[in-house]
Image (tube, rainbow, N blue to C red):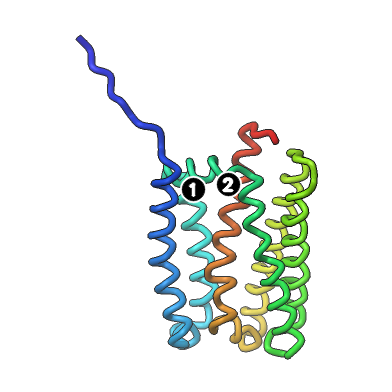
Amino acid sequence: MTTLDFHPAPSPRRGAMILAIGFALYASLALGLSAADAYLRIHPNAFPATIMAANIGLVLAYFLVPSINALGRAMGPYHLAYFHIWRIFAGAVFLAYGASGALPALFAERAGYGDILAGLIAAALLILPRRTRFVLGFHVVGFTDLALVIATGIYLNTTAPTTMDTIAYLPLALIPLVGVPLSIMSHVAAFDQIARGWRA
């Protein structure tokens, strides 16, 4: 007589709980450091290193934790895209900080206009016909914008570090510490699903 092991399917609900608890712990620590003005006292690269670690950690969680992967698949590329509507607000904030001189114009304009464009395309998906090419196009644009902005931030942090100090302080730090890692993860999850044959 043989006994077959039963392995229940990964639960999206469990994935949501794990992701919420894990990310909340990270966000509490990261935002606490920002509120205490600790990043610039630790090391000039501590803030960008935190953002990169969060990005890598969430992407690895999607691929390595079955229930978090199940959560991403349950949402699908379209619902993952709708999350990015928040970037309209983020873009406006970056442009406002740039206009006041609190951020370098190069960074503020790339982050501001890029986020607004991504957010508007995400919103347009609500009314456009559901087509794989439309949602894939959004994720390509949204991911490219984030990659360009992150690269610009790293460049300015290296060549003119003091000009980027403002981004390490609250409330602006909420965007790169919280919004960016979740956005990167959602893009990667959407690319993975489309590559595996997802169709609208």
Residue in front for this viewpoint, 110 or 89: 89
Q: Earlier in the sequence, mark 2 or mark 1?
A: 1
Q: CA distance from mark 2 to mark 1?
A: 7 Å
Which residue is situated farthest in the left direction here? 1
The amino acid on which the numbered mark 2 sits, given as a three-letter code, is Ala
Q: Which residue corresponds to the image point at 73% horizontal and 90% vertical from the top-left?
A: 100
Measured as percent of width and height from the top left, residue 38 is found at 44, 85
Residue in front for this viewpoint, 84 or 102: 84
Q: Which residue corresponds to the image point at 42% horizontal and 79% vertical from the top-left?
A: 32
> Local crowd at mark 1 within 10 Å, few (<14), some, or many (≥20)?
many
Residue in front for this viewpoint, 142 or 10: 10
Q: Which residue corresponds to the image point at 58% horizontal and 47% vertical from the top-left?
A: 189
- Eyeballing the image, is 92 above or below 180? below
Measured as percent of width and height from the top left, residue 127 is found at 78, 49
Which residue is situated farthest in the front direction here? 127
Q: Which mark is residue 15?
A: none
- Counting the numbered discs, the total is 2
Q: Which residue corresponds to the image point at 76% horizontal and 48% vertical from the top-left?
A: 137
Q: According to the image, label 1 marks what residue?
A: 62
- Eyeballing the image, is 43 above or below 84? below
> Local crowd at mark 2 within 10 Å, few (<14), some, or many (≥20)?
many
Assess whether mark 1 and mark 2 are in contact (beta carbons under 8 angstroms).
yes
Q: Name the quarter where the N terminus is drawn.
A: top left
32 displayed left or right of 73: left
The amino acid on which the numbered mark 1 sits, given as a three-letter code, is Tyr
Measured as percent of width and height from the top left, residue 37 is found at 47, 87
Q: According to the image, label 2 marks what residue?
A: 189
| Residue 86 quadrant | bottom right
- Eyeballing the image, is 64 above or below 48? above
Q: Is disc 1 placed on a helix, strand or loop?
A: helix
Q: Is disc 2 placed on a helix, strand or loop?
A: helix
